[in-house]
Amino acid sequence: MTTTISIPTVTGAPLATGVAARVRWAISDTLTVTKRNLIAITRIPEALFFATVQPIMFVLLFRYVFGGAIHPGHGINYVNYLMPGIFVQTVAFGAIQTSIGLAEDLQKGLIERFRALPMARSAVLAGRTTADLCRNVMVVIVMTGVGFLVGYRPTTGVLPYLAGIGLILLFAYALSWGFALIGLSAPNSETAQVMSFPLLFPLTFASSAFVPLADMPSWLRGFATYQPVSVVVTACRSLMLGGPTSHWVFQAVGWTVGILIVLPPLAVWRYRTRT
Amino acid sequence: MPYAIEVTDVKKTFSGKQEVRALDGVSFNVEEGTVFGLLGPNGSGKTTAVRILTTILKADSGSALVLGHDVAKQADLVRSLIGLAGQYAAVDENLTGRENLAMVGRLNHLPKSYVAGRAKELLDQFDLAASGNRALKTYSGGMRRRLDLAAALVARPTVLFLDEPTTGLDPQSRNDMWEVIESLVGEGTTVLLTTQYLEEADRLANTLSVLDHGRVIAEGTPAQLKSDLGATVLEVGLHDNDDVARTASVLNAIGPHHPNVNGRVVEVTVDNGPRDAMEALRSLDQAGITPTTFTLREPSLDDAFLALTGHRTEDGDGEDGSEAKGSGGTRDRAGQPESTPIPVGGNR
């Protein structure tokens, strides 16, 4: 396929004909928007806080305040039990920033400008979720460091640990698209935040992230066992601490891929049609 | 001369709690290289028209062409030819001026080296060179609007859409903005601008359409429109309610226009401002009436609406123009300063 690009010597933006140029520009648009969002994180104090201080606070809170009261059993100490859960909970909470950020872009009129530009329709959302992925990489690095400082000792070795981290990042990326959809559906950033919490609280707290499922009432246990956050946490726990692995990893990847198949097209459709 | 913008019978209704017919069969044409003004109060449909023409919104029916390309069917092509700036199209507060321009340039798929040079050029042109490396959060309202306009120009668009480019700006910034827009037109860019200010339309636009409730209620050159409206308005403020009726009859005698009573202010359109004003003062003196204010001013958008529609500008949340007429407060909402006379630039 040939690519023709007319360089704007006088006026207007260049035009692409052909699939190759379109794909190349979609990627370049996504990277441009990603860069914009990453710059913003370094310049918005709250964003930096959510990326660094909040994860540390959660680790310390559960390790030292609640940790003493929770006994996971099976001879596992609570720090080791906790850390995979905290990882997933933190990146899930971080995804709220996706919905708030997009709602703000809409509110301030930035999306209006983007929609009048000849850029790929998916780039605003893909750029936002990619920036979130980069932020989450930093978050898990910070948390791994803090985890080690408070006594976290994964037992399976480096590669399974990295596989667990990879699974968390992929799941977080999928979640970002869900929260992008919320951000695009909210009338303003405050509402986007309010709309995010009712989804996030049951997912992160009615899960195996912090407490063993055995301690929950049976009506809750069913939901808590099979919902995506629990599945991903359990898969990570088995990757990082040992135990039956493939079954849970398979389910976790299933949830993640499923979300990625359904939500991104829905979010892009919402972006195109929102008035 | 070919048309840069052709709008034919465009309709758009927003559904929701209350159905709003934003555009009710709007048509207008804009010649290449000219400035076209869409004049109207809040809620008249100006922004909706701009959003349809800039491919952001789809019309329910009718056709809209930019440089001969259908905005709905050839959206990407249209997007590569236009620029949009204004009250609702924003720039990123967290980025610096330079970063904003670079981002828009890259999203227009212009080469990096070109974008860097173009950003510098625009920062210089818009008097923002010194603040180019500061985050937009630190910019004043006027600086932000200038950068917003600069961002719309990165890809050298052939057609530029400016949605209320000066709403909310102080007089100095507004004047700066006008000069910038005028220089653009000198370079051959076609400009469509929306405004609530008759003064702005008069200064910048070659032709204009007046919108009210999603319909074009008047069109033509600013001079034609002004002559339809009468040249000047004489406004007499009174201390005493009892003087209102007598003043009205005194002003009515000047003719040929009939005065309007607006609280304790009586206003009348006059054909020869200074002479009629002197006559009015003499007659008022003879009648023993001493006004508290006596102003001769150019017609405002409010006057235009009164003349064209029989009701004053409103926010669209009430059909009853006579009620708004009595309050006198609606003029503030339309953004027209009441006390200062408005200079109308004679030659553009």
Image: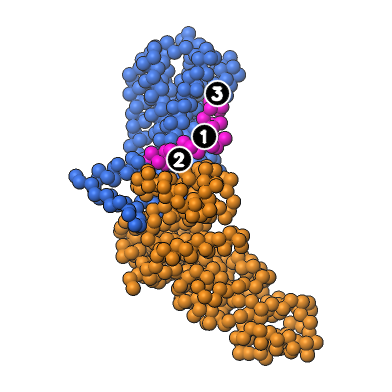
Q: Which mark is residue A42?
A: 1
**Subunit that carries the residue with mark 2:** A
Query: Residue at the location (41% across, 27% down)?
Result: A169
The magenta stretch spans residue B140: no
In percent of width and height, residue B340 lies at 66, 70
Within 10 Å of the Cα at label 1, are there few (<14), some (14-19), or many (20+) other Cα atoms?
A: some
Region of the chain picked out in magenta, as a range = A30-56
Whether residue A202 is visible here, answered yes or no, is no
Q: Evaluate if marks 2 and 3 touch, with contact meaning CB atoms under 8 Å apart.
A: no
Query: Which chain is rendered blue in the image?
Result: A
The amino acid type, in three-letter code, at marker 3 is: Ile
Q: Main secondary structure of the magenta part?
A: helix
Chain of the residue under the numbered disc 3 shown in the image: A
Q: Tell me, what hue is chain B?
A: orange
Q: Amino acid at mark 1?
A: Thr
User: Left of A16 or right of it: where is A205?
Assistant: right
Tell me whether marks 1 and 2 sit on the same chain: yes
Q: Which residue is mark 3?
A: A56
Q: Quadrant of the N terminus of chain A?
A: top left
